[in-house]
Amino acid sequence: MYIIVVGGGQLGYHLARALLAESHEVLLIEKEAAPSQKLINELGSVAVRGDGCEASVLAKAGTSRADMLVAVTGDDEDNLVACQVAKHKFAVPRTIARVRNPRNESLFRKLGVDVTVSSTNLILEHIEHEMPSHPLMHLMVMHDRSLEIVEVTIPAGSASVGRKVKDLALPAETVLSLIVRPGQKPVIPGPDTILNAEDQIIAISPAESEEALRASLTGA
């Protein structure tokens, strides 16, 4: 694959090195003079100086034949612009953007960025996994369909304990796909499956329905 990386900071540098090690064709673009010269001295023709937000720079980089563009500068606006130019002017099939402010993620997706990566949210996910009492954990986000796969633990005392799945007020387009119970084999729930305290529910739900799903299953 031909992958263009916009942003030659530590993240962009190590990403480019890792992609090269996987035998991908890589071009690393950095707009600042001193960092770009350092990258050129170390990586040679793999690195170039230029503003990855500018169409002329991306044209020279051969973006029209790129399989993917990854924007990992320290500026959310630059990352968004680079992805939009790559997607709409050069028809790059896949764009990935680093997002420093998690509040910008939904905006990026609405504006056509295929994948967003927020270091803040990644760290938060790890914290949640280290907190057994946390009722809802994100397992996967399918941005192209605006769906999330989440794990919800039913706490003791929840109004959903003892109720059948068909009697729950689940958000629209939500599917309970698996129930994991302590000491038992996983169960694929049906309409008449009764929920127990400490059940771990794997659910697929629209991203905007997360709070409603949490409330329905945990009473939180």
Image: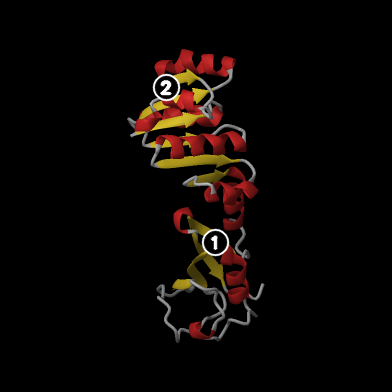
The vertical placement of 47 against 64, above or below, is above
For label 1, the residue is 207
Is residue 20 rendered to the left or right of residue 41? left
Extreme-front residue of the structure: 89
Residue sitting at 49 percent across and 35 percent down?
Answer: 85
Find residue 118 and name its label: none
Q: Residue 11 in the image: state x and y as whole percent.
A: 53, 32
Say which of 134 and 40 sits in front. Answer: 40
Image quadrant of residue 79? Answer: top right
Q: Is residue 208 above or below residue 94?
A: below
Look at the picture and state if 153 lies above or below 47: below
Task: Give the residue displayed 47% in from the left and 24% down from the top.
Answer: 56
- How crowded is the residue under tag 1: few (<14 C-alpha within 10 Å), some, or many (20+)? some
Which residue is drawn at the image coordinates 48% and 68% (left, top)?
203
Q: Reading the chain from its start, which is encountered first: label 1 or label 2?
A: 2
Q: Percent x, y for residue 117? A: 53, 44
Measure the C-alpha gap from mark 1 to mark 2.
Answer: 38 Å
Labelled disc at residue 60: 2
Is residue 10 among what the camera can see? yes
Q: x and y percent of residue 63 in the render? A: 40, 30
Label 1 sits on what residue type? Answer: Ala
In-front residue for pair 31/24: 31
The amino acid beneath tag 2 is Lys
Residue 171, horizontal then vertical, whole percent: 55, 73
**Circle 2 Cα neighbour tier, 10 Å, few/some/many (<14 / 14–19 / ≥20):** few
Quarter of the image for the N terminus: give it. top left
* Quadrant in which the C terminus is drawn: bottom right
Kindly state the secondary structure of the residue where label 1 is placed. helix
